[in-house]
Image: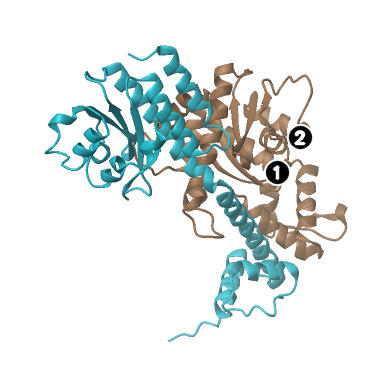
Amino acid sequence: MTSDRRARILERLYPTGEAKLEAARLGEVCAEVTGATGAGLMLMSGDAPRGSVATTDEVSTLIEDLQFSLGEGPCVDAYRFDRPILEPDLANPAVVRWVAFAGPAVAAGARAVFGFPLQVGAVRLGALNLYCDRPADLSVDQHADALVMAEVAAQALLIMQSHAPPDVLAIELERGSNFQHVVYQASGMVAAQLAVSVAQAMIRLRGHAFGHGRPLTEVAQDVVGRRLRFEDDPDANRQATQ
Amino acid sequence: MAAQDLLIRTLVELADSLVDDFDVVELLTLLTDRCVEALEVDDAGLMLAAPVGSDLRVMSSSSAAMFDLELYELQSSEGPCLDSYRSGEPVHNEDLHTTGERWPRFTPAAIAAGFQSVSAVPMRWRGTTIGALNLFRKGPGQLDDADLDAARAFADVATIAILQHKAALDARVVNEQLNQALNSRVILEQAKGMLAERANIDVDEAFDRLRAHARRHNLRLGAVAHDILAGTLTVDDIEPPAPFRGP
């Protein structure tokens, strides 16, 4: 019964009866409840990943980073299509869903990946990401747990944010999160370098990262550290000489 | 002893009604109605203190006639609901013929309404009690333990329903705020990068200058960031900080 699952989850989230909850703990409970190897909570808006508020280990951090950089993956699809996305064997799928995402994710140790929309009623704020280190289907029970967990997590995130002043992200969400600020800083710099909009600058950054097989965050760090400049000719991005 | 299948059906029904947009009063009315159908009680009422710490108010009752009754009104100052709400413990089968001293105003009113005994279970979630479920009996004899357990289960489900609903009500508004906070932050980071590049400074110093500009001109930081990106505010408009003067 849904209320039983909900009660079990709430009991794990608030074991001492204290109402205070850290986003990191929320991520851990997502993994515990569903029996996944690891979990992550991704906030999204306007179809794009905005940042990861909780990841339980290095692999789940990488899964979220990849999705942020590439704009594809289980969370992105779960949010976009508004339904659970299940990939029981990322290394051997019937159809390759995520061309750029799959390789590095498998190499890092993620074999099965799942995305569940984080939503409360009609309000969607992101996606819950679960992964297993071996090929795995979610059982009917795990699937039901994940659905209820995603809803409880969405509510918990909103409750955290509800205490924050307008225009400011709640401290509980900011702490331990990765909002990839350096990528946005770099897009501002590249926009100035190329005299283009920040949206276009972002495309150039992503293109450069993809073309050179480097993580977007690394490329952004190089831009902000002034080790990399973008120039007008898209093929002429040169490494700045130190 | 309550019919098992009716109990289970009620719990399923209550749980089902938790999904999507449900009406709290409707749910609580279902709950009090089912108490009368499934348990050996003649009337049931549910009282909530909302916001937490305020007076108990009746939210639903199995009998429409009872709804406005002073039986509930009175319980903002005394009675089984208030006792259960305050202690967080159930009130078991209190014989109304012996409660005159404990509840001097509630007791005669309850007897006048035709009741002989009364029970109440708290609506608790962890440390917090948000209200109580009140059960009235007209006949002799007592509510058995199985019925009391069932009443507690009903109260638990109702508690979760109410706590969840409170979050659902604000979800849209909070989500908009969340989106706005996320977007403001993105814009600020982009503006830091743009100013850093144009002024040939690092991003931390760019942030200091943006903030100083906002303060000096009494503007919101977000508005300043936006103007930088839009090109309506240039490097020259953003004064560098005053040069450091030694003592």
Q: Disc 1 sits on a residue from what chain?
A: A
Q: Tell me the element at label 1.
A: helix
Quarter residue B123 falls in: top left
Q: Disc 2 sits on a residue from what chain?
A: A
Q: Colour of chain A?
A: brown
Q: In this picture, is B88 found above or below B4?
A: below
Q: Which mark is residue A188?
A: none
Q: Nearer the viewer, residue A201 or B125?
A: B125
Mark 1 = which residue? A69
- For marks 1 and 2, the one nearer the N-term is 1
Q: In this picture, is A234 found above or below B71?
A: below
Q: Is residue B191 left or right of residue A141?
A: right
Q: In this picture, is A143 found above or below A215?
A: above
Graded by Cα atoms within 10 Å as few (under 14), some (14 to 19) or many (20 or more), the crowding at tag 2 reads some
Q: Nearer the viewer, residue B193 or A213?
A: B193
Residue at left 39%, top 13%? B3
Q: Amino acid at mark 1?
A: Ser
Mark 2 = which residue? A100
Q: Is residue A22 left or right of residue B39?
A: right
Answer yes or no: are tags 1 and 2 on the same subunit: yes
Q: Is residue B23 left or right of residue B191?
A: left
Q: Amino acid at mark 2?
A: Ala
* Residue A115 seen in render: yes
Task: Please say if the residues under marks 1 and 2 sit with CB atoms less than 8 Å apart.
Answer: no
Q: Nearer the viewer, residue B172 or B6?
A: B6
Q: Residue A70: horizontal and vertical position, in percent?
A: 73, 41
Residue at left 72%, top 62%? A189
Graded by Cα atoms within 10 Å as few (under 14), some (14 to 19) or many (20 or more), the crowding at tag 1 reads many
* Residue A55 seen in render: no
Q: Residue A89: horizontal and vertical position, in percent?
A: 68, 20
Q: Which chain is cyan?
A: B
Q: Tell me the element at label 2.
A: helix
